[in-house]
Amino acid sequence: MTNAFFPALRRCSLVAILSLLAVVASGQSDPAGLAAVLVPGMTELPKPTLVMIDGREHETFTRRPTFVPGMDIINIHLSHLGGDNFLWRIDFLEKPAFAEGVFNFYLDLDLDAATGIQAGEPETKNAPPPPLAGADLSVTFSQNKCTLHTWTAAGAISESREIPFYIRNRELYFRTELNLPTKRGRVSLAIAANTHSIVTPEKPNPVMRDTTRRLVIHRFELKSEETIPDNLDSDGDGIPDGIEEIFGTRPDRPESFTTLVTSPLQSAKQRAEPTYVAGMDMTEIAVAHVAEDRFIFRSTFAAPPPLADMVHILYLDVDNSKATGRDMGANHPGTGTDVMLYMVSGKASMQLHGDMQKQYPSREIRHALVGDQLYFCADLPIEIRPDGAAFGLFAIAHTAGTPKPPMYDNVRRVDCTGIPLAPGPKLPFDGWKGAAAMHRAYGLGLIRPLLSRPDCVVIPYDKLELAGFDIDYYTSRQYGHLKAQRPRAAAGHSAPKGCFHVGFMIFDSKDGSDIGLRIDDRDIARVRINTGNQNYWIYWLPEARDFTGDEYVELVALDEKAPHPICSLFFSPVAPPQREQSTAVEHLTIYIPPATVGEALVSWTSEHPVPARLEYGIGNFEQVFAEPRPMLVHKAHLTGLDPQQTYQARAVG
């Protein structure tokens, strides 16, 4: 069959021919192994970047007898090997099983659906999934053979050739050479994939099929040819620059550590036991003040600690009072603990006790392992005195996962005083430098007219180029949106030419989203999405900017766990009117329950869901009732009132 025949094929015929090509394919099973998919000089697989999440099929399909776990696409990963070489990793639910099936992978390299494969919707819902319209390159894996196809602008195959592949457990690897235009060290391309059982003229409908949900444009950072060493430590304080960025510390200013306690190695008899683990034998604990309330604790062990198999806890008495915090018994060295810094089976966390839970809501903690030293970095409510920071410390380390750990070590409680303080403000944990203010407004009644203006350029969520974001396919909200898959996820687009206020639209459910705005790799602004009124908001820069059309604008996820439901990026020629959430409260009512003394029920309403706060007192408002849960109707039950006095009260929105 000639190439000229392909443009005339209808979509169903195109799928059928691709399947028939897979049927006649034959080949040897992965003869070259790992080396076949790597470039010369490489001996092991690089750490990939997750670029697409498809997930396991719904149990409605997995329960069917025709379901093939080895054809269920889970994730797609990408690694840049240098030059034009890109390594793809496709994860399946189980080991790839395509003896009677086909895996199709599509790339739209010019982001133009009018060039490349010409495809439409399938004629029936049971037909094989369609190819990606506009794909310029495709890879087919079937019956132990991997074939790469390149497509002309008119939709004809210009070249087909077999390429090597590698299978490891449930992962399929293959390498493609892509000559992509780069912009600031990044490339953009659209990805889609599907699987289906082989179809024939007698059996045109596949019994098993899976497809990635929809076309997503991904922006991928290329491997730098000028790689900075992972262990570069510019200030010589023992903490590599890459970790200092995570900690929010300055790589050009060494941290000054103070030794809090030293501990000798366990006895020779203990070290001779088969259960002894040198990486859990603590030798020193030190601390450094970074700035404001940020501290770094450093635990040194006799050998690199096996984090995945151990528990390490620092008990901190931040107010030096055994009467507050955790009560572990009169003689226990941990009594009075207000803060616990954990490392349990490779995961770091922080726990607050007593009044500290209410007074200090921060729970962010960072950790790093450098040789035989484990670092914890956190913002902590440690007492500050004229001569420096002061607190009590107790620490343990032991084997994880057992009530009677075979390896155990502890250091005695010490009262630490006079810890030197470092001047200057602290940096954000994420290292974000942009601090420009952004204005905001909420409500679709305001947003719709703005974004529908003919001179307002709007890039919706599914047209943004994604790096670490994915589309939230299961949202029930009125507008589609993105969700972040990892910290520092980015969604961006080239700016149009003209003078615009750049901004974005997002849904605010008070989930802690922090969004950064970046233009041409320069951090510009940062906003916290924190009103929690369950409404749509727009945020924008108050100053209009002149864009040449070459700039690249990105929205960046600056925290780890929030979903960041971004709906669109927009460029408005006019500044929208600001509109803040109303904090109005009304209908303040007081009710005295019968047959009670010194009690009162106070209720009120608010225009939007807000936490309840009632301030009251005798001639003042010094007493406070508070309920953190946002509500529209609020009620406060006051007790202990003096029946002989007159009280005044006010509800605060």
Image (tube, rainbow, N blue to C red):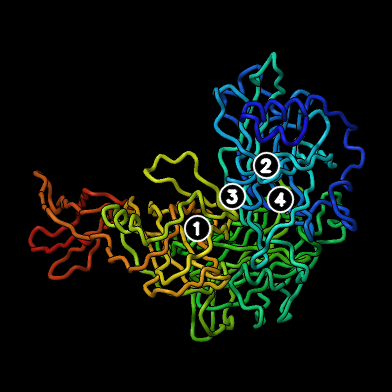
Q: Which mark is residue 112?
A: 3
Q: Are marks 3 and 4 in contact (CB under 8 Å)?
A: no
- Identity of the residue drawn at 8% across and 63% down: 646
Q: Nearer the viewer, mark 1 or mark 3?
A: 3
Of the numbered discs 1 and 2, the one sitting upstream in the chain is 2
Q: Secondary structure at mark 4?
A: strand
Percent x, y of residue 335:
54, 60
Q: Residue furthest top?
A: 202
Amino acid type at mark 3: Asp
Of the numbered discs 1 and 4, the one sitting upstream in the chain is 4
Say if 570 sits above or below 591 in the image. Answer: below
Q: Neighbour class for label 3 at 10 Å: few (<14), some, many (≥20)?
A: some
C-alpha separation, residue under disc 2 versus residue under disc 4: 14 Å
**Residue behind mark 2:** 106
Q: Secondary structure at mark 1?
A: loop
**Residue behind mark 4:** 78
Percent x, y of residue 545:
43, 74
Amino acid type at mark 1: Arg
**Residue behind mark 1:** 326
- Identity of the residue drawn at 55% across and 66% down: 552
- Identity of the residue drawn at 83% across and 31% down: 144
Of the numbered discs 2 and 4, the one sitting upstream in the chain is 4
In which quarter of the view is residue 234 placed?
Answer: bottom right
- Identify the image quadrant of the N terminus: top right
Q: Nearer the viewer, mark 3 or mark 4?
A: 3
Q: Is residue 200 shown left or right of residue 163? A: left
